[in-house]
């Protein structure tokens, strides 16, 4: 059975982060709070762990998970480059609910699924998530729910959907804003909005000028 830890208790939180980091290093799955909804996470560099994550959600390789990082340096190591606009967007909105799709660093040996040579990266604005990510390094993280079901806004909701497929549940209380992150594609000459989310397009345009949208 997955173990749930109350991260509002300082003593439990320290143990929880230690247990969660150990679970990630073993290739197990953990559930963690983020600044949007709860996420289910695995070591991004352990292919079997990423497969377990997709299996737990009921997803195939055609929907590869994004990667969460605890530092900007970790993010830049994962990509070929941030393009003309990536650093300005990071300076303005990270940590926070902005996911950037970049060309993945070809030197990395990892398998997130059918990514077509790209990676979606984000640095979440949540202390528990950031503390864990600084301990584990980059994690593949998707919303902590079965595919097609509502995203979990509490650890209990995540546990009801994912059960014992997850080793450690980090309970950080109810998430305050379940609006998903905004997703922006930086792999083309003009940044393209892939998903509307917590950061409005107008704010992105305020930083980088033009953003292509489908409407």
Image: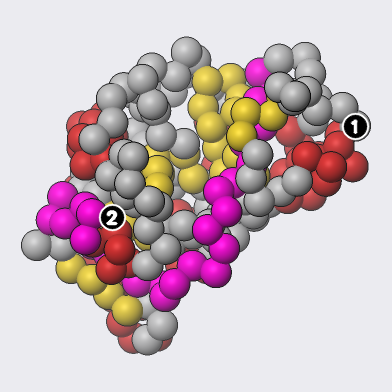
> Relative to 60, is 95 above or below?
below
- Which residue carries the number 2 mark? 30
Bounds of the magenta segment: 160-187
Q: How many marks?
A: 2
Residue 164 part of the magenta-drawn span: yes
Left or right of 129? Residue 19 is left
Q: CA distance from mark 1 to mark 2?
A: 38 Å
Which mark, residue 74?
Answer: none
* Residue at x 58%, y 20% (from the top left corner): 103
> Relative to 164, is 202 above or below?
above
Q: Which secondary structure, mark 1? A: loop
The answer to whether the residue labelled 1 contacts the one labelled 2, judged by CB atoms less than 8 Å apart, is no
Whole-percent x, y for residue 51 in the image: 24, 31
* Residue at x 32%, y 79% (from the top left corner): 6
Which mark, residue 209?
Answer: 1
Left or right of 69? Residue 8 is left
* Disc 1 versus disc 2: nearer the observer: 1
In-front residue for pair 4/44: 4
In-front residue for pair 72/89: 89
Viewport quadrant of the N terminus: bottom left
Whole-percent x, y for residue 44 in the image: 37, 37
* Residue at x 28%, y 55% (from the top left corner): 30
**Is residue 156 something one can see in this rendering?**
yes
> Relative to 163, is 213 above or below?
above
Display colour scheme: secondary structure
Quarter of the image for residue 56 reads top left
Q: Which secondary structure, mark 2? A: strand
Going from N to C along the chain, the mark reached first, 1 or 2, is 2
* Residue at x 77%, y 14% (from the top left corner): 189
């Amino acid at each position: 059975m997955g173990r749930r830890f109350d991260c509002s208790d300082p003593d439990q939180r320290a143990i929880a982060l230690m247990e969660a980091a150990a679970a990630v290093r073993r290739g197990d799955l953990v559930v963690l709070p983020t600044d949007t909804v709860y996420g289910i996470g695995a070591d991004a560099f352990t292919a079997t762990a990423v497969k377990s994550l997709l299996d737990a959600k009921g997803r195939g390789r055609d929907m590869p998970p994004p990667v969460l990082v605890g530092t900007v340096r970790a993010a830049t190591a994962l990509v070929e480059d941030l393009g003309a606009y990536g650093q300005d967007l990071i300076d303005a909105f990270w940590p926070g609910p902005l996911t950037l799709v970049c060309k993945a660093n070809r030197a990395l040996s990892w398998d997130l699924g059918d990514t077509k040579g790209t990676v979606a990266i984000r640095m979440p604005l949540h202390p528990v998530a950031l503390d864990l990510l600084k301990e584990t390094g980059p994690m593949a993280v998707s919303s902590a729910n079965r595919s097609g079901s509502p995203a979990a806004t509490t650890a209990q909701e995540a546990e009801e959907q994912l059960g014992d497929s997850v080793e450690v549940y980090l309970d950080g209380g109810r998430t305050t804003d379940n609006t998903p992150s905004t997703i922006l594609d930086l792999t083309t000459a003009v940044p393209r909005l892939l998903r509307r989310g917590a950061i409005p397009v107008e704010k992105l345009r305020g930083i980088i000028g033009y953003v292509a949208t489908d409407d």
